[in-house]
Image: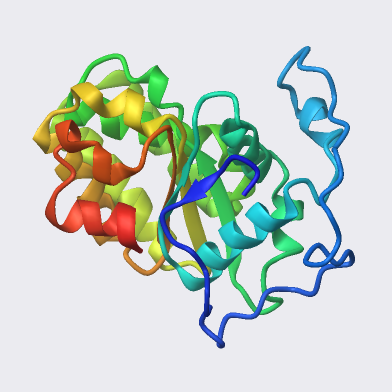
Amino acid sequence: MCGYGYLEQIGNPDPSVQLAEQPVDQNNAPELPQVLPPSTGRTFDYWQKFPRHYRTREMQTLAHWIAAGISGAVVGLPGVGKSNLLSFLCQRPEALHSYLPAEIETVVLVPVALNGLLENTVSALHRLFVRAFYERRRHFSPALQTMIGAAYQIVSTNHDAFLTQSALYDLLLAIEGSAMRIVLVLDRFDIACQLWTPAMYNALRSLHEQLRDRLIYILGVGRNLAELEDLALVGDLYRLLATL
């Protein structure tokens, strides 16, 4: 798949989840080289220059995961373009919507910059997630924008683990009451979390439990998660990230 490996192959998708018909038939036509803008910057304008149907097959697979409410991982060696794919997914949400069923609820994509984690603690991880929501706040309703701003103020001025957890959980509970689906995009996950503590892995699983029906993880990794024995991806968290 153009240098990408997926932990789940979509052979017989759920018939209740129908992807939108594509204007270009990519199944029988050979894939043509795509002319992309030069890498002179990663601004909003940079991503607008990508063709709307960039990586159609891969975007269709990601749309299937999101529509079905399942998590997954994009696997590829450095240089194959998995980070470009995930960035395009986040920066061009209208492209994703062209692959989603018309009846799907609002989808908000939230990229999390794992390399911005300053210390390997649960409190720091929760603060990082709140900041990620804050950076994407314009994609939420005005009421949720206010809550996101308040949560960001709390975690910016207080590193107490309980307070940071409460601020994030309160935000997730508010989202649970809205008609939307949240996609947390964690690129370079295998590199960033090599020094994580068991409590941080548990925190990642707990976030999903707080918003089970509305929170999806999409990971970008350089190796199959089954090979990452040193990351202690066992039990429920492994099943969540690797097999759904």
Q: Nearer the viewer, residue 44 or 143?
A: 44
* Residue at left offset 39%, top offset 64%: 176
**Residue 154 visible in the picture:** no
Expressed as whole percent of the image width and height from the top left, the position of residue 151 reads: 37, 37
Instruction: Work out whether residue 69 can be spotted.
Output: yes
- Is 160 left or right of 139, judged from the image as shown? left
Question: Quick one: quadrant of the C terminus?
Answer: bottom left
Is 11 positioned to the left or the right of 210 in the image? Answer: right
Count numbered badges in the picture.
0
Q: Please state which of residues 165 and 86 is positioned toward the viewer in this rendering.
A: 86
Instruction: Note whether 89 is above or below 49 in the view shown.
Output: below
- Compare residues 131 and 233 and report the one nearer the observer: 233
* x 40%, y 58%: residue: 71
Relative horizontal placement of residue 118, taking residue 175 as reference (left or right): left
Query: What residue is at 71 percent from the left and 61 percent from the top?
Result: 97
Give the color scheme: rainbow, by chain, secondary structure or one colour: rainbow
**Residue 148 position within the rendered picture, expressed as x and y whole percent measured from the top left:** 45, 41
**Quick check: 172 above or below 149?**
below
Q: Residue pushed farthest bottom?
A: 15
Residue drawn at (76%, 16%) of the image = 39
Residue 177: quarter of image: bottom left
- Residue 36 spot, x, y in % from top left: 84, 29
Percent across and percent down for residue 43 are: 74, 22
